[in-house]
Image (spheres, grey):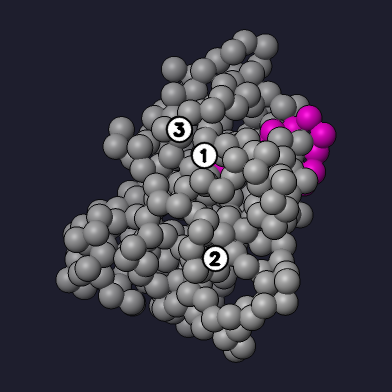
Amino acid sequence: MIKTNRDQLVCQSVLGEITSPLGGINPYRIDPDGHPDVYPGVGGITYNLRIGDPACGLFADHVEPGVSISNFTQFQGQSGPNRALNLFSCAGNVAKVVSGEAQGKNGRVTGKHGGIEHVLVDFEPEVLEDLVIGDKIQIKAFGCGLSFPDFPHIKVLNLDPDLLEAMELTDLGNGRIKVPVTHEIPAKIMGSGIGASQSHSGDYDIQMFDEPTVSEYGLNDLRLGDLVSISDADASYGRIYKTGGMVIGIVVHSNCVLAGHGPGVMVIMSSKEGLLVPETDSRANLKYLFTNL
């Protein structure tokens, strides 16, 4: 097992409320070919879309699986509490319902979505049925500052230490770590979210509009919760193009119709020196990994 600094980390509570889906001022979204339509989008409780389900082929735009939470409602628009929720929540964190009919039920954080700044949580279907918009969910935020002491050129972000252990990483020597992923993605098709000033919250999107590239890399079967690699990229302190770099991320939301957008990827590891070595494994999905937590 690769050594981490988990004993130095702080576990702290953050809170969010289940959001309402957003319709937008203009309900129409226009695709790159100029066709407008009205699509389900971010927010709310999505009953029929969870981790492990397809991220593509849906009549949807930026749909978030499971439950979407924020901390804007309770604090009447103050950004500080919602920023804490988004910065400190990590994939794999335990999320507990603390109000409403489902009070006491647990789920797990699956990712974070930038722009609207939501944290996404997976619950079993019977729990989803008892949840309502406005229910409060408290997260044991654990993982901020996680690192590999023996691998100083690899940055870890947005990961619960238990989930990191479940990923079964391999020390390849010479400062390199092998990471299981379902897909390898070229940085040239990364779109919305690139250039962000930090990578501890939000995501950036895989553009799916170039069919030859989508076919070459087999991206049509991307699933929500997939671990993926992005080559020639770095996101240690913001998402950039970097020849020879490597980023590992989690697919957090569905495909999109808007130009420059697509399935969102939340960063979980980065090495500008390319010391992360992806290995294709169909089990590299949160649905499978959560069974080992």
- In percent of width and height, residue 82 lies at 51, 67
Contact? badges 1 and 2 (CB < 8 Å): no
Q: Residue furthest bottom?
A: 25
Pointer 2: what residue? 62
Q: Earlier in the sequence, mark 3 or mark 1?
A: 1
How many numbered circles are shown? Answer: 3
Which residue is depicted at the point 60% across and 27% down? Answer: 278
**Of the residues shown, which amino acid type is indicated by label 2?**
His
> Is 246 within the magenta?
yes
Q: Nearer the viewer, mark 2 or mark 3?
A: 3
- In percent of width and height, residue 73 lies at 44, 79
Q: Which residues are magenta?
A: 239-249
Q: Earlier in the sequence, mark 1 or mark 2?
A: 2
**Of the residues shown, which amino acid type is indicated by label 1?**
Leu
Pointer 3: what residue? 282
> CA separation, marks 2 and 3?
23 Å
Which quadrant holds residue 279? top right
Is residue 198 something that shows in the picture?
A: no
- Label 3: which secondary element: loop
- Label 1: which secondary element: strand
Which quadrant holds residue 96? bottom left
Which residue is depicted at the point 66% across and 54% down? Answer: 208
- In percent of width and height, residue 25 lies at 60, 89
Please, is residue 215 above or below residue 22 in the view?
above
Please, is residue 189 above or below residue 181 in the view?
below
**Of the residues shown, which amino acid type is indicated by label 3?**
Ser
On the picture, is 123 further left or further right than 195?
A: left
Residue 227 is marked as 1
In this view, the residue in front, 181 or 238, is 181
In this view, the residue in front, 130 or 90, is 130
Is residue 62 something that shows in the picture?
A: yes
